Amino acid sequence: MASPYLDFDRGSWAALRAATPLTLGEADLAELQGLNERVSIEEVETIYLPLSRLLNLHISATQTLHKATDTFLGSLHAPTPYVIGVAGSVAVGKSTFARILKALLARWPDHPRVDLVTTDGFLLPNRELETRGLLDRKGFPNSYDVRKLVQFMVDVKDGTSAVHAPVYSHQAYDIVPGEFQVVDRPDIVIVEGLNVLQTGEGQGGRPARMFVSDFFDFSIYMDAPEEEIEAWYVARFQALRETVFQDPRSYFHRYASVSDAVAEQTAREIWRSINGVNLRDNIFPTRDRARLVLEKGPAHAVQRIRLRNV
């Protein structure tokens, strides 16, 4: 059966950059990169700039379509934000990718306002996860307040002012009570999370009427072989022991003083019992719902790009 995707290697994708300018420098990248993950300027030029050009074309076309609809209806609505979804496994590099993409989009000549929202803020609080017996399934589809997340997307797409998104603390490993990110009618919203391409089920096993992905204008899946992602997860866990875990307030402070061998064993067990299971059962099956798939190889470098054509 023919694939619905066009397939590109690094060279053929890089050629699609055309004249898109590089607006980030080494210092900018240093501030945007995640722990234990380094993205080179060459990677930005080869992978990110062609994507920036593609999104620019898509957004311009979408804005024209909205204007045509307003003309047909004889009304003028508030501008509708263009929403980009970014999905993929824990430790695959979604957060770094989303931050760099946000910085590039915000540096377009017309200087659009770009917000980045992570779905971690829509996880159920730990106390509720404990009550439901789901604390060791954090990140699985049923650990999110999906109704609140969908309502957030409705309000953002409707052009509602000052929409509030809950804030998640990775240090506390929980929602921060009373703290919110305010999304106030930006031009572009990037929504990054594990489950943003999942459809899930409604109550009683019935299909849900509305999904987060229904609100996306463009969707991206960050892909890599599972063994690579596991290795990145273990390396990140070890790096966190030297940084965030050192803080006594950290939920994982107890791992700061264990040996390297015990830490590696712990990280691999967490991967095999939680994150790997979630990837195989819930996240990876959504890959082919994405408009664009970026497949990484060693050192987080994208080796293959697949763009949905139908």
Image (cartoon, grey):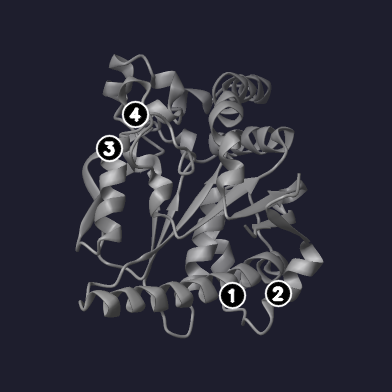
The residue to which callout 1 is attached is 53
N-term-proximal mark, 1 vs 3? 1
Q: Nearer the viewer, mark 4 or mark 2?
A: 4
N-term-proximal mark, 4 vs 2? 2
- Residue at (27, 67) in percent of width and height: 185
Residue furthest out toward the front = 72
Label placed on residue 202: 4
Q: Which is nearer the eye, 109 or 285?
A: 285
- Residue at (71, 49) in percent of width and height: 296
Amino acid of disc 3: Arg
SS at mark 1 in the image: helix
Label placed on residue 147: 3
The residue to which callout 2 is attached is 16
Q: Is residue 280 left or right of residue 303?
A: left
SS at mark 4 in the image: loop
Q: Nearer the viewer, mark 4 or mark 3?
A: 4
Asked whether the beta carbons under mark 1 and mark 2 sit within 8 Å of each other, the answer is: yes
